[in-house]
Amino acid sequence: MHIALDEWKKTPSQVRRYGNYINGAMATSIGGSSIERKSPATDEVVAVWQKGTREDVAQAVDVAVEAFNDGRWSNLTAAERAEVLLKVSGKILENLEALALIEVQETGKTLEQARGEIQFASDMWSYAAGSARALHGDSHTNVGSEKLALVLREPVGPVALITPWNYPLVVLCQKLPYALGAGCTVVVKPSEFTSGTTLELAKILEEAGLPKGVFNIVTGYGDPVGQALAEHTAIRLISFTGSTATGQKIVQASSSNMKKVVLELGGKNPTIVFEDANIEAAIDGAIRGFVWNSGAECCSGSRLYVQRSILESFTRQLVEKLQAVKVGDPLDPTTKMGSINNEPQFNKIRSYIQQGRETATLAFGGNVRSDLPGLFIEPTVFTNVSHDSVIAREEIFGPVAVVIPFDDMQEAIKLANDTQYGLASSVWTSNLNTSLTMSRSIRSGIVWVNTFLDIPTEIPLGGIQQSGFGRENGRFAIEEFTTTKTVVIQNPATTDRFV
Ligand code: NAD
């Protein structure tokens, strides 16, 4: 790894410069242009990467196709591939501090949180190494005594991974180790705001012994780079995490060759607090629900439903507790919320807050922290919110929650399910029956009961409805990157004769 952490600490404004990563080498974009990334927390330029073009994509895909077809990776045994993945897991940990600092620079999230994310990222490589070795097909021995049917699991081919800016390394590592574990070759397009850790990972993969050409990166904007990948007819699967609007474009583009699509999209997730809940835990969970990662969390619990009997005391305590959420310097260990990631997102959140001011009651926050150097906004809570209002229905992707009362469980279920999304939800109750009914009735990819954003690597993640389809992590993750082939073998002496 080539980041001298001590050097970086001495000169924090040192700019990191990257090429695209194609066939094992950093390369300048054919278009010759680059993108400067300023830290959203300090407004300093921290990195420069390539502004990729369709031609860069074509080159990277050609390399990934050749690497797939010659079997330099897909023909290795699972044990051999797992050895590389395990080395990557270890090397990510060795470089934890440097990678975490890059995430802080490019995202504005807190250092403490970024450290946790790098650990999580490392763990996914070790889990995927196990998944690769456990992956196998199936056999049917009950289709006739002279016949054997086999179901083979094969890598789907060269794949493209497109990632967002909120968890740059984590989201990549929810895809990449599983794709590689399955034997695929890869072209990645990271977010134009946060490409640093993806590019650093290329060096780690090289050191871990991944053959050249198996992993490639083209940085740049969604259109052309992501769009060209989604349209490319040699890419057999596209795994995308990002907004529902972009997900729709990916689906359309994928029709060029009917490539397989895995989509992890947005959410407007309910947090439901019953009167019998452990209130202290519920308040803490509710705050984490919309403050974590400055609200840029696809599972963010931004619709907060509170049973009417406790509405007033709950809201009062919520607001009191929010005073303790320190917003500011991401490197300060006492900071709970860093900056917003980028200016378009900052402006989008401000516009939703303005709509909230016009249609609901502002119970907490609502202001930009103009005393700080970057893009900082206070955690914000609205009450007296209509369920049909924009702030109650649209994904804000910022530290903004709406509090809405409900009377009983049936109403809570109805409100929670009244959404186009279906990613995550959390329920706070001490009643076992309520836990059971709620977790069976809410339509979302994951339901947490008395906990929030609790994501061990072993459990699958993903949405339903307009939150997407396909699963990451857990035992299904690697299967997404495979296809099955059925083989039927017959003793010719007993094959059915047609004429
Ligand atoms: P985005 O859709 O704007 O961008 C995501 C990625 O897609 C970026 O790399 C972008 O450059 C690229 N892109 C943009 N236009 C494209 C196009 N036409 N073709 C191909 N690629 C294109 O999303 P974002 O603002 O980076 O991320 C925020 C969104 O991501 C939120 O909606 C959030 O809920 C979602 N998200 C979902 C999950 C999940 O697991 N479900 C996780 C994290 C983020």
Image (cartoon, helix red, strand yellow):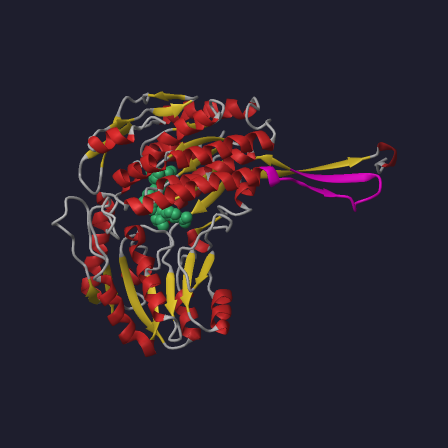
The reply to whether the magenta stretch includes residue 477 is: no
x and y percentages locating residue 424 in the rendered image? 42, 57
Residue at image position (41%, 33%) is: 188
Residue at image position (71%, 39%) is: 150
x and y percentages locating residue 263 in the rendered image? 45, 45
Using the image as rendered, state which of residue 241 and residue 83 is in the foreground.
83
Give the quarter of the image for residue 393: bottom left
In-image side of 469 versus 164 (left or right) = right
User: Does residue 195 appear in this view?
Assistant: no
Residue at image position (21%, 29%) is: 14
Using the image as rendered, state which of residue 175 and residue 15 is in the foreground.
15
Highlighted range, magenta: 133-152
Question: Furthest-right residue in view?
Answer: 493
The reply to whether the magenta stretch includes residue 147 is: yes
Q: How many marks?
A: 0
User: Looking at the figure, which quarter contains the C terminus?
Assistant: top right
Using the image as rendered, state which of residue 15 and residue 345 is in the foreground.
15
Give the quarter of the image for residue 205: top left
User: Looking at the figure, which quarter contains the N terminus?
Assistant: top left
Using the image as rendered, state which of residue 30 and residue 168 is in the foreground.
168
Question: Furthest-left residue in view?
Answer: 371
In-image side of 65 versus 52 (left or right) = right
